[in-house]
Image (cartoon, rainbow, N blue to C red):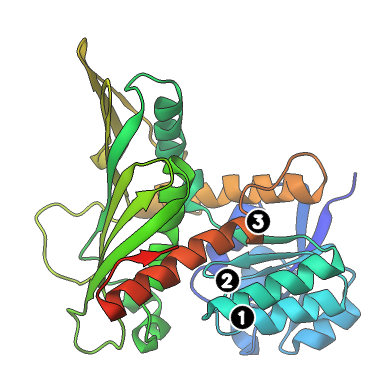
Amino acid sequence: MPALRFALFGAGFWSRFQLAAWKQLPEAECVAIYNRTRPKAEALADEFGVPAVYDDPEQLLHQEKLDFIDIVTDNSTHGRFVHMAVNHRLPVICQKPIAPTLAEAESMFEACRQAGLPFFIHENYRWQMPIRALKRVLENGEIGTPYRARIEFISAFPDIVNQPFLAELEQYLLADMGTHILDLARFLFGEADRVYCQTYQNQRQIRGEDVATVMMQMKTGKTVLCQMALATTPIERDYFPQTFFFVEGEKGSVELGPNYWIRVTTEEGTHAKRYPPPRYPWADPDHDVVHASIVDCHANLLSALLGKVPAETTSEDNLKTLRLVFAAYQSAREGRVVTV
């Protein structure tokens, strides 16, 4: 079967990792790159051997024979490109968050649904190897039924240096990193009933929040606490971009801690095993756990486009995460618990 032909929309910071991950999968071939600043697209195309470059998205869609598009631009442009794809009858893979507002995200979903076109979200955090291993521990019953969990993503890493546009967002941490973390909460513990959130802005030169604490009551009765910060405050041990978990169950507990160690404790004692991510030569060694997960996320979405397996991170599924994000913002704004 010939490889599926796709166009990459966007040539910013994450695009080269997105494209490098696609290169790991022979069933997909990038044939064109769009970017509003043409020299950036040309540089990326030269690096990866992509034959065509455009600074006009409609021209690209008219001239190239495609099987899908992959959108890696900032989310203020996602809606425009998704609706273009619908007009050209093309499936879409899109970065998170889907859109700046819930209404726009729902409109994009509805347009694709009515057209009968796949609309997938590239939510790669749940594809991290240690997090998949943690899910297996929770499902095998070793610690019994979980009743409380803590998820932590706290770092002094200056994320805004790599992506300066984040400093201009009125909604920063929850919309960007919170989309990942709340998706992990859903992936591991199911859907939420109620949300309570508090936010804080430590970096005065930015517009949005860089600290957020979200507590959720899940429909299964579990309590999940998500603590997030990219406040550039010095901390003694910084393992960016690792996410840490501590889960309590009826028979014991499980912790995913630094350097990918999972420790399971029951009445029989504690046993530990390390689940490091695979190493790709194009990945930043400090970011292996995130960059490697892009490949596995791609593989799942590509298999879905080929009709082999269901996609895990569909737009329908990711809308549930986005609703949690906006419920958290509402809670922080109004100072109350919000029912989802």
Look at discs 3 and 1 and give the one toward the viewer: 1
Between 139 and 28, the one nearer to me in the picture: 139
Q: Which residue is mark 2?
A: 98
Specify few, some or many for label 3: CA neighbours under 10 Å numbering under 14, 14-19, or 20 or more: some
Residue drawn where x is 48% and y is 73% of the image: 13
Look at discs 1 and 2 and give the one toward the viewer: 1
Q: Which residue is mark 1?
A: 104
Q: Is residue 216 left or right of residue 53?
A: left
| Quadrant placement of the N terminus | top right
- The amino acid at mark 1 is Glu
| Mark with earlier residue (3, 1) | 1
The image position of residue 210, as x and y in percent, is 26, 74
- What secondary structure is found at the residue carrying circle 1? helix
Looking at the image, is 132 positioned above or below residue 98? above
The image position of residue 77, as x and y in percent, is 61, 84
The image position of residue 28, as x and y in percent, is 76, 53
Quadrant assignment, res 232: bottom left
Mark 3 to mark 1 CA distance (whole Å) = 16 Å
- What secondary structure is found at the residue carrying circle 2? loop
Specify few, some or many for label 1: CA neighbours under 10 Å numbering under 14, 14-19, or 20 or more: some
- The amino acid at mark 2 is Ile
- What secondary structure is found at the residue carrying circle 3? loop
The image position of residue 190, as x and y in percent, is 47, 44
Q: Are marks 1 and 2 in contact (CB under 8 Å)?
A: yes
Quadrant assignment, res 76: bottom right
